[in-house]
Amino acid sequence: METINSIQLKRIFAEIARVLNENKDLLTELDSVMGDGDLGLYVPKGFKCAAEALTDDMLPGQMFMKASSVVNSEAPSTLGTLLSFALLAAGKTAGSDSELSGDKIVEIGQSAIDMIMKRGKAQPGEKTILDVFIPAHEELKGALAKNPDLRVAFEAALNQAKAGFDRSTEMQAVHGRPGYYGEASIGKQDGGAMVGYLIYQGILQAFL
């Protein structure tokens, strides 16, 4: 598969929602260590509602826009809000294209990352979802430059998402409640980074 159409994008959202909801207890557990424990409630619910709100007659860009609105409404948390902004940026980048090529998918991913960095005022290495998204995206970009098969590229990206998550565990948190822990956050898994890893799991599952 070298492009993604509306039907396929709808399946991707459904798989992301499924994976997040299957792991909501894990997300709650991780967030309870350094956060307020609501991560497993809001983000999985936001993506579940978003996936259910998508219809086959929407263009991919419209799907991202709709998902942004729903996640913003149903996931009223810091990460939920950041992800809604990321989806909004993705929708604007997708534009009116009826199918998303590999190059367009790379553009969409970069726009989402840029938006998270802008709105969250975060940088790589600060123990956030960016520490998963950025290496995974770079791997995706490199893989697609060699082979246009999206399944192969996202499989490679998932491996880097896992590696990024593992590296983030040894980082010191800077932002939000985890940042209050300072050096004590080193060695603890970050819930936001786990969400990033789970999102890539969901994307790949949609291709299998």
Image (spheres, rainbow, N blue to C red):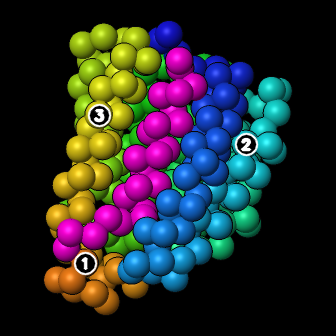
In the displayed structure, 4 sits above or below 34; it is above
* Front residue of 138 and 48: 48
Farthest-out residue, bottom:
180
Q: Secondary structure at mark 2?
A: helix
Q: Residue at coordinates 78% horizontally, 39% vertically from top-left?
A: 54
Q: Residues within 10 Å of mark 1 (few under 14, many from 20)?
A: many
Instruction: Say if the magenta span includes residue 30.
Output: no
In the displayed structure, 8 sits above or below 195; it is above
Task: Specify which label sits upstream in the sequence, 1 or 3.
Answer: 3
Q: Relative to residue 74, is residue 130 drawn left or right? A: left
Q: Residue at coordinates 76% horizontally, 52% vertically from top-left?
A: 49
Label of residue 159 in the image: 3
Contact, CB < 8 Å: mark 2 with mark 3? no
Q: Residues within 10 Å of mark 2 (few under 14, many from 20)?
A: many
Q: Gap between marks 2 and 3, in whole Å?
A: 25 Å
User: Between tags 2 and 3, which lies in front?
Assistant: 3
Q: Amino acid at mark 1?
A: Ser
Q: Which residues are magenta?
A: 186-208
Q: Relative to residue 175, is residue 89 drawn left or right? A: right
Q: Residue at coordinates 50% horizontally, 60% vertically from top-left?
A: 26
Q: Residue at coordinates 55% horizontally, 52% vertically from top-left?
A: 23
Q: Relative to residue 154, is residue 47 drawn left or right? A: right
Q: Secondary structure at mark 1?
A: helix
Task: Specify which label sits upstream in the sequence, 1 or 2.
Answer: 2
Q: Position of residue 50 (x, y in %)?
A: 73, 49
Label of residue 51 in the image: 2
Q: Position of residue 44 (x, y in %)?
A: 63, 56
User: Between tags 1 and 2, which lies in front?
Assistant: 1
- Give the labeled residue for mark 1: 185
